[in-house]
Amino acid sequence: MRMGLAIDASCDLPQDFLQQHNIAVMPIAVRVDQSTFKDNRDPAEVQRFLSLKLGSRSHSAETEPCSVEDVQKLFLEKLVLENDCVFCLTITATRSPIYEHVVKASFAVLKHYRQVREPAGMTGPFLMRVMDTRSLFAGSAPCVVEAVRLMQADETPAAIRERLAYIAENSYGYMLPRDLYYLRARAKKKGDRSVGLFSAVLGSTLDIKPLLRGYRGDTSPVGKVRGWEHGCETLFQYAADRVRAGLLVPVMCTAYGGDLDELPKLPGYDKLVQACEEHGVTLMQAPMSITGMVNVGEGAVTIGFAAEEHPIDF
C-alpha cells in the first residue's frame, strides 16, 4: 500500500525533510497591508516576508487556512493518484479551523476518488485519515516524524493511527515570544483575551517573558522568565533535560521566527545540541511559518517533542 502525508503550513518542519519524504503542504494565505504571501513552507517565501520588515504591522494580518474546496482539489487532482492512503496532520483544532476544513473535505474526497483513480487504472480503495496533533508550530512536528517512521516500517493504517493518537496526546510545543506588546495586539485582533494590556505593559517594563505551552489542545502560559537571553537558556535547558529523561520519538524540533542562522547562536542552544548528540536524538531546525510569525511576532523561539507526562518546573 502506498502511503503519504499531508500537513498544514503552520507545522514547523525543515523543508528538506518535507521534500525527502514527499510530504504535501496545505497552504495558508497571509495578507499584510498590500502584500500577500502563500505560506507553504517555501524558504524563499519566508525570506520574502522577513525582507519586507513588516514588523509591528504584521499583527493586523489576515490569515486564511486552506479552504475545504482547496483541500478537495489537492487530493482529487494529486494525492489520490499518488497514494492509497494519506494521513493529514494538522495543528490543534482549538487554535485553527484547518482541522475542520480537512474533515469536511474528506467526505467529498472519499465519495469521488473512484472517478479519478479508475480512469488511471487504479481500482483499489483509497483511505484518508485526518488527525489533530493537539499542539502547534514545532509541537506538531513529532507526530509527522513518527508517521514517516511508521510508514517506512510498513505498518498498517490502523496501527499508524493508534500510535499517532498516542503521540499527539503526549506532544508538547513550547514558545518564548520576544515582544509582549505585539502578542497582545495580535490576540486583540483575533478576539483572544489571554494577554491583557496590564500584563503586556508590566512584562515589557520589567523585561519579563512568558513561556507558553501547547499541550492536549490547550495553549497557555506555564512559566515566566526575566530577560530574553535568560529565557532562551531556560527553554533550551528544559529541552535538554527532556532529552536526557527520554522521548517517545527520538527527535527534538526547534523553530525560529527569523533568520534561521541565528537559532544556533542563541544562549543555551549549544547545550541542547550536546544533549541530543549524547542520547542519539535528532535535532531539527526549521524556520517558523509565516502564519506563526504573524500570530506571535518575529523572533519567537519554539521547541517541540513527545514525552510521557511530567511535572513542569520553570
Image (cartoon, grey):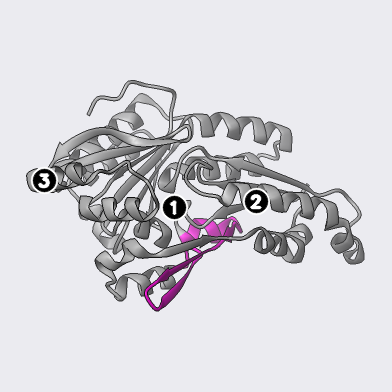
Pointer 1 or 2: first along the chain: 1
Kind of residue at badge 1: Asp
Whether 212 is drawn above or below 29: the answer is above
Q: Residue at image x 29%, y 57%?
A: 297
26 within the magenta span = yes
**Label 2 neighbour load within 10 Å: few <14, some 14-19, many 20+:** many
Q: Is residue 134 left or right of residue 116?
A: left
Determine which residue is flagged by label 1. Answer: 12
**Distance of mark 1 from mark 3, alpha carbons?**
27 Å
Residue 109 coordinates in the image, percent (x, y): 77, 54
Q: Secondary structure at mark 3?
A: loop
Q: How many marks?
A: 3
Query: Which quarter of the figure has residue 73?
Result: bottom right
Badges 1 and 2: C-beta atoms under 8 Å apart?
Answer: no
Pointer 3 or 2: first along the chain: 2
Q: Is residue 3 visible?
A: no
Q: Residue furthest left?
A: 206
Q: Is residue 244 left or right of residue 74?
A: left
Q: Nearer the viewer, mark 1 or mark 3?
A: 3
Determine which residue is flagged by label 3. Answer: 207
Kind of residue at badge 3: Asp
Q: Secondary structure at mark 1?
A: loop
Q: The C terminus lies in which quarter of the figure?
A: top left
Q: Residue furthest bottom?
A: 34
Whether 68 is drawn above or below 96: the answer is below
Residue 170 coordinates in the image, percent (x, y): 48, 29
Q: Which mark is residue 102?
A: 2
Q: Is residue 147 left or right of residue 30?
A: right
Q: Which residues are magenta?
A: 15-42
Q: Residue at image x 62%, y 47%?
A: 100
